[in-house]
Amino acid sequence: MAPVTRTYAITNVNIIQGPGRKVDMGTVIIRNGIIQNVGKNLTIPADAVVIKADSMYVYAGFIDGYSRVGVIKPKEEPNRERPKDPGNPEPAQAGITPQNDVRTSLNPAEKSVEDLRALGFTTAQVVPYGGMLPGSAAIIQLGGASSNDMVLSGNSSFYSELTPAQRVYPNTVIGVMSKYRELYRQAAQAKSYENMYASNRAGLERPVSDKILEAFYPVIDKRVPVLFKAERNLDINRITLLQKDLGFNVVLGDVKEGWDMVNKIKAANAKVFLSLDLPEAVKEEKRDEKKEESKKPVDAEKEALEKRKAEAIAQYTAQASVFQKTGITFGFSTASAKTKDIPANLRRMIAAGLTEDQALAALTTTPAQLLGIADRVGTVDNGKIANLVITDKSYFNEKSKVRYVFVDGVMYKYEVKEEKKTDAKNGNGKKADPNGKWSYTTETPQGNSTGVIKIKNDGGTYSGTITNSMSGQETELSSIVVEGNSMTFTFGFNAGGSTMNIDVSLTIDGNDFEGTMSVGNFGSFPMKGSKDPNQ
Amino acid sequence: MKRILIAFTVFTSVSLVQAQVDRGNVLIKGGTVLTVTKGTLENTDVLVRDGKISQIGKGIAAPSGFRVIDAAGMFVMPGIIDAHSHAGIDAINEATAPVTAEVFTGDAVNPFQVGLYRALAGGVTSIHAMHGSANAIGGECETLKLRYGVKDPEAMKMEGAPRTIKFALGENPTRVHGSGNGIVPRTRMGVEFVIREAFSQGKAYMEAWDAYNKAKVQKGFRGTPPAYNKRLETMADILRGNIIIHCHSYRADEIYMLLNVCKDFGIKRLVFQHVNEGFKVAPELAAYGAGASVFSDWWAYKFEVYYSTAYNAAILTRNGVTTSINSDDGELMRHLYHEAGKTQKYGQLTDDEALALITINPAKQLGIDGRVGSIEVGKEADITIFKNHPLSVYTIPMITIVDGVVRFDREKDADDQRIYVDPKQTIDVTLHTSSGHDHESCMQGAVYETAKLFGFNLLEK
């Protein structure tokens, strides 16, 4: 059912019009999908739905520079047949479909649209599925009733990947790069010939129409840039090799490892969308002093490797900050990011040196400029499309919740769930009670195993036992430590005349726990359990 | 018309933008200098300025700021060159067609492979990073300098090294395409046909373009240009003499076949790789001026490689064939000096002849002998310093220098030489211990019981 009015007044709100432009406790008025007025002491129109956003924050809706949000994934065709002549496949089989247009496979009801919008994203440049040349990209709004409603502008980029074809030519990255150069040069040749033919046709063979080569023409004319998937540092190098040979305008999408490639990126005059995906952060582990004392060579080696891994993760996290410092403007892309991780990843980038304003610019004004849509979106200003996100705290605050998102002036409201009284992860509540009988399951590569843990609290001193369904043995627990809602213990397992220690670390949340079981050099396995109700 | 010409010239011109290369200054003092081409010089200094050998002699004073390496009692030789490697690249075989002359391993250089550092630790300074042998005509190859530590893949390339291309005869291309896909070539006859056909097409393509380019400068010319084809473009460049062929081959008959094919098409620059039966056609190879890059004693890994001898390198050498010993392997690459030494056991080659197999000869085969492969004034300072003579089994590579920059130093060899670290890797350290009684680390007896207890079983893998 259509809303009765398309006029909204968001009142008493902190307006972040753009990076560094703030209006305290002002009002934003939206009418017919457009921002009509922004400021203090505005008259509320009589037909307006009033949103009392007391002390909330309103930002321009975020722009995703490159992803497949809202794009229908084609059904995988299980073509297991061995190709007859793998050196001469049909272009589509080789991933060469530059004539395709992502606008033919959009769907506003895709769950990805809803999920990304719930984080405050309102606009995205989206690309088709495919191989090395999937087709042309489009800039879409994350809303609307039909695929046409979504489109802000079509043919925004000529989308390319270094992805090889399966079982047919080009089957390697060197094949892809070679094919890319050949197609580009053939297109340039065909285009020149067409121009010559158009100027005087007499006596010349007519040019043959080729929709694949014709798709390159806007790129050769530099009316449309090439958007390349460019996650790895070596991808960036290879793309800049092609760019140097062929001379197209290039956009690097979903860059994850670009910090050592900044000079090449600058030399190629590339536009950049940095990935919002980050490698998982290293969990802080409590050091066991006893272990420190008896450090073995294997521990020292492991520690050195862990250290290098942590340094590597820090480089990924600091990428945005490095780009900012070297003066490369960048937006963000969500192409490979887990949607639920995006706010936390932004906070990690900020902790690694990016300022909140810089992060906001990379989410709003910069991508708007890079995509050529800054006249319509990217700031909270009169006359712009009403793409807004409203949060109860500053967006980059860990506790911040998105409360409303507007896309083309259409409101999406988000209810805030009641928070649990105790925060299970931080243990900043009451102390958990491990006392009692717990049933557990561990997941190992060969399947699950189960057992029972019994814990007894004897005036603050804990003791207990563990059993396992596979062995039936009951083993005493040692070094039981309970802190807040975390519990750790160790038990020895006697096998073949030698004993090995198994370390368990659990987080207790009421009558459930979750954690890991570390078995010597075999690694760690997840462990889950709950308190036996029959005690 | 002019527009076509201009557009086309721009597109096909080779990119001249070059990566920044570090060049060092160093004085190597008092070593036994094995120049390979100019004899052995006892107690001699080698001065390297700006990445090049600027002076060889006795009592050279170190200019200020130069690093001084005391090589007294050590052996200073040219950096080892491996004419057959697949290291340092992310793609090796575009195995989908019998002819893929258009692909280029230089597009897929990966300077982060830690194996490159290990090669440096074996005294190697340059490698020929080749396309594989799945296709009768594979792709162009890249000559790399092992400037391990650089993060720019372009800085690994030996700037200005001649273009080379991989060909392959015999079982590999017939198995992949003939047996695998049921297309030509299925036999050695088929391989010859595929190569001749590709050259013929390349020749026709070259002639069509030459005719077109000639015609279009005529006044009032109007016409259709030949369709651009990157594969034939490369074939034409071989015919023009701009690319050196490096051909995977084993049997004497197929080696002789390719000599004849090349003769028919007027191709002169040709090196045979592996060439296990090269000793049978050594005079023919020498007469043609073709090179041979062989293993010291590696064979019998498939049918066509049974008829082999460890005297191959020596026989080829003594017949006047420019011969090298290569690795084609990450492990073998680390001790090519031992491989060269074997020719003294099997063939009594002199020290210089043996050392030439891994230095100046592979350099000649790659067309880089004017720049590297021996210790001579004016050459690039790719130098390896050994403790004990490099042809002795007791030799130890101590320092490897590329362009005057020390890239490996045994004294400063850290455990973890990776340039980038996978941020998602699971860190799993396995300690090999000889003590079976320490109950913390002794896992032997516990493996099976642990498996039973926790439901995973490593023994069953």
Image (cartoon, coloured by chain):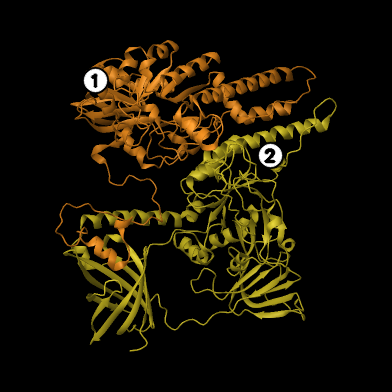
- Colour of chain B, in one word, is orange
Residue A504 spot, x, y in % from top left: 29, 71
Q: Is residue A230 visible?
A: yes
Give the SS element for disc 2: helix
Residue B331 spot, x, y in % from top left: 32, 36
Residue B182 spot, x, y in % from top left: 55, 35
The chain painted yellow is A
Indicate whether B438 appears above or below A52.
above
Residue at the image position 54 percent from the left and 80 percent from the top: A417
- The residue beneath circle 1 is B344
Extreme right residue here?
A202
Q: CA distance from mark 2 to mark 1?
A: 60 Å
Classify residue A284 by image quadrant.
bottom left
Q: Is residue B368 visible?
A: no
Please give the chain letter of the residue carrying mark 1.
B
- Compare residues B259 and B207 and report the one nearer the observer: B259
| Left or right: A166 in relation to B397 | right
- Compare residues A488 and B152 and report the one nearer the observer: A488
Classify residue B341 by image quadrant.
top left
